[in-house]
Image (spheres, helix red, strand yellow):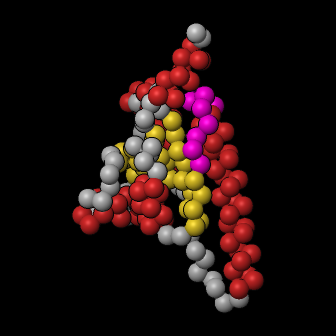
Amino acid sequence: MSSFDADQELRATSNRTFLVVIDDSDEMTKALRYACRRAQHTGGRVALLSVIEPAEFQHWMAVGDLMKEEAREEAEERVNELAAYVHEQTGCMPLLFIREGRLKDELLKLLDEEEQISILVLAAGTTSEGPGPLITALTKSDTVGQLRLPLTIVPAALSEADIDALS
């Protein structure tokens, strides 16, 4: 059995799926690298979630529909680009999820629906405003108790070498 076959067999029997929420932040790439490295080292796999937030502009239905379609196309393009990165890093295609709605709500729904997701990986922001709106929302006492899995927060200040050493 080749090492590639052994890696594929380990992934097939592993129950670790590391979910990364896709956004446009610089720190998201830190969470993605960490999840890829952990999946690679534990025989797990990565899942990617992109959430298309509802447009605030709803005056004309046709314009709103066009904006929604453009947002979906951009989300699909970004997810596919990152899926290629995950495959390159882990040798395994990630699970892909694209949802429409409010980020926190859609994330919590996905975690309830997809039992194979076992770890949520997010990266903290580097601004003085705090770790980021999603981490802030998820760590509030009324929400953190709802999570059925561990939340891993990757500090955005870590270098790629730091992430590789930790994971």
The relative height of residue 113 versus residue 85 in the rendered view (above or below) is below
Quadrant in which the C terminus is drawn: top left
Measuring 60% from the left and 28% from the top, which residue is drawn there?
91
Residue 154 among those drawn in magenta: no
What is the quadrant of the N terminus in the image? top right
Measured along the vertical axis of the image, is residue 141 above or below residue 161? below
Depth order, front residue of 28/60 = 60
In which image quadrant can residue 23 be found?
bottom right
Is 44 or 135 nearer to us in this picture?
44
Farthest residue toward the bottom?
59
Residue 22 seen by the camera? no
- Identified at 68% across, 47% down, the residue is 80
Boundaries of the magenta span: 88-96
Given residues 34 and 142, the one toward you in this image is 142
Q: Give the x, y percent position of residue 33.
A: 51, 38
Give the side of residue 109 with respect to residue 22, left or right.
Answer: left
Q: In which quarter of the view is residue 59 placed? A: bottom right
Q: Which residue is outermost to the top?
A: 1
Q: Is residue 71 visible?
A: yes
Is 161 drawn above or below residue 6 in the view shown? below
Residue 11 in picture, x, y percent from top left: 51, 28
Residue 157 coordinates in the image, percent (x, y): 41, 43
Q: Residue 160, how many percent across, how many down?
A: 49, 34
User: Residue at horizontal 51%, vertical 36%?
Assistant: 45
Total labels drawn: 0
**Looking at the picture, does residue 12 appear above or below residue 150?**
above
Q: Residue at x 33, y 46 (%)?
A: 150
Tell me if 23 is positioned left or right of 75 in this view: left
